[in-house]
Image (cartoon, rainbow, N blue to C red):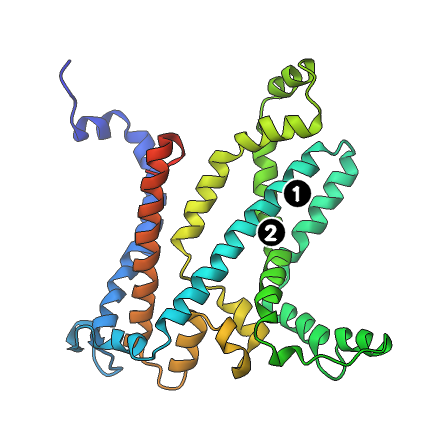
Amino acid sequence: MKKQGILHELYTNRILFLMLLPTLLYFFINNYLPMIGIYYGFVQFDFNTSLFNMEFVGFKNFEFLWKSGKLMELTLNTVGYNLAFIVLGNVLSITVAVLLSEVKGRWFKKISQSILFLPYFVSFVILSVIVFNLFNYEQGVLNTVLQQLGFEPVDVYSKPKLWIFFIIIFYLWKNFGYSMVIYLASITGISEDYYEAAKIDGANSFQRAWHITVPMLKNTFVILLLFALGSIMKGQFDLFYQMVGNNGLLYSTTDILDTYVYRSLRVTFDMGMATAAGVYQSLFGFTLIIVVNAVIRKINKEYALF
């Protein structure tokens, strides 16, 4: 049979391609066209001239990150926190979704979903107020309780290592409900025939969840994992900045690339250096997702993005 070309494909399925056109235009305008701005990372930014008339300086803007002496620390902090968010967030989301799927009470299940999903809509500004009122040295809830119990107050804002746990805990509290809803939706799409067959074979609730529900969630997990890995160098700027602010005592464990670049450039507003940092983040994430997708493709092609 003679192989048909792309023009024949376009003509044959023209209605489908026309329906796809608005989506393609959206991504082109909002995702691909702005990529021209990458060029800012290789020029000396000047408000008085256009992009392509600025002085080309090569990799000079990238020296801002390298010569800071903190590039490795910032990268490790950013990647480390995001890995913790991804791993712990997915494990917690899957666990809660599986438990809720086993609940028989309809109203209890709906109310539980709403309560767990509610923190996702809490702004980071409100979160910073909650954190401050919890850990304030003089009038915070933590130190008030400690003093009532006869213990000495703790200056939480001078102990960098504690904030590793605080940031992870508050991130999970705020965001895991969103992933939980996605996994719960995937569970509802699993055919009841599998569970009925397992019941006939004598499987209990735990065995049905472990041998049917969890394996069926692999595809959803891999897709969410690859999407998350693509932005692993994009730290949760709002989370870190609102919780830590400009407290230099905590920078060793809470400073990520986004917050460092913001503090470094908020006075000079050098677009070239800011773009260089963004290019570094994007290339790191792009390389990582290509490598991980290749590994997943070797293991099972069905779970790979491409």
Question: How many C-alpha atoms fall within 10 Å of the one at disc 2: few (<14), some, or many (≥20)?
Answer: many
From the viewer's perspective, is residue 62 above or below residue 196?
below
Instruction: List x then y, in percent, for residue 263.
Output: 43, 80
Residue 193 as seen in the image, left or right of residue 133: left
Nearest the viewer among 36 and 74 is 74
Give the quarter of the figure containing the N terminus.
Answer: top left
Q: Are marks 1 and 2 in contact (CB under 8 Å)?
A: yes
Instruction: List x then y, in percent, for residue 210.
Output: 61, 30
Nearest the viewer among 267 and 282 is 282
Q: Residue at x 64, y 57 (%)?
A: 173
Look at the numbered disc 2 and give the secondary structure of its residue.
helix
Instruction: List x then y, in percent, for residue 291.
Output: 31, 47
The residue wearing badge 2 is 176
Residue 96 bears which disc, if any?
1
From the viewer's perspective, is residue 18 above or below residue 143?
above
Q: Residue at x 25, y 79 (%)?
A: 45
Give the quarter of the figure containing the C terminus.
Answer: top left
Q: Residue at x 34, y 52 (%)?
A: 288
